[in-house]
Image (spheres, grey):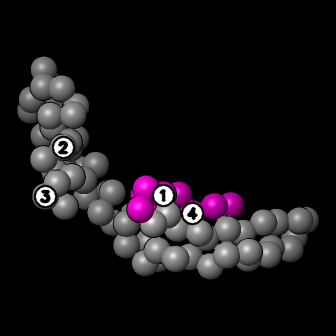
């Protein structure tokens, strides 16, 4: 398993492997644990809400201002 927080500047190095029932942590999280998940969920909810009322608007035009604001 690898943490999926992968920005270009400083990707999280969190890495765990499993053999049978045993887990081995190779690298601990270097991101603030799960702080990015909350931002992603809030952005997704806002984008869906906005997109439903602006159906013909391109996705990039809907999401980009929200990402910049966050």
Side (left or right) of 57 relative to 21: left
Q: Which numbered tag is attached to residue 69? A: 3
Q: Earlier in the sequence, mark 3 or mark 2?
A: 2
Disc ID at residue 6: 1
Res 62 quadrant in image:
top left
> Which secondary structure lies at badge 3?
helix
Residues drawn in magenta? 1-9
Report the quarter where the N terminus lies: bottom right
Q: Kindly report the distance in space between the C-alpha atoms of the residues bearing marks 1 and 3.
A: 20 Å
In the picture shown, does residue 9 fall above or below 56? below
Q: Is residue 57 above or below residue 17?
A: above
20 up-or-down from 68: above or below = below
Which comes sooner in the sequence, label 1 or label 3? 1
- Report the side of 33 relative to 50 (left or right): right
Q: CA distance from mark 1 to mark 2?
A: 18 Å
Q: Please report the residue visible at 16 percent of the width from the left and 54 percent of the height from the top.
A: 68
Mark 3, residues whose alpha carbon is within 10 Å: few (<14), some, or many (≥20)? few
Task: State the residue at coordinates (57%, 63%).
Answer: 3
SS at badge 4: loop
| Res. 18 image quadrant | bottom right
Q: Are marks 2 and 4 in contact (CB under 8 Å)?
A: no
Residue at the disc numbered 4: 3
């Amino acid at each position: 398993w690898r943490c999926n927080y992968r920005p270009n500047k400083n990707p999280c190095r969190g890495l765990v492997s499993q053999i049978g029932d045993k887990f081995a942590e190779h690298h601990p999280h270097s991101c603030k644990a799960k702080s990015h998940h909350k931002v992603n969920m809030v952005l997704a909810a806002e984008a869906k809400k906005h997109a439903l009322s602006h159906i013909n608007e391109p996705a990039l035009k809907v999401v980009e201002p929200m990402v910049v604001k966050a």
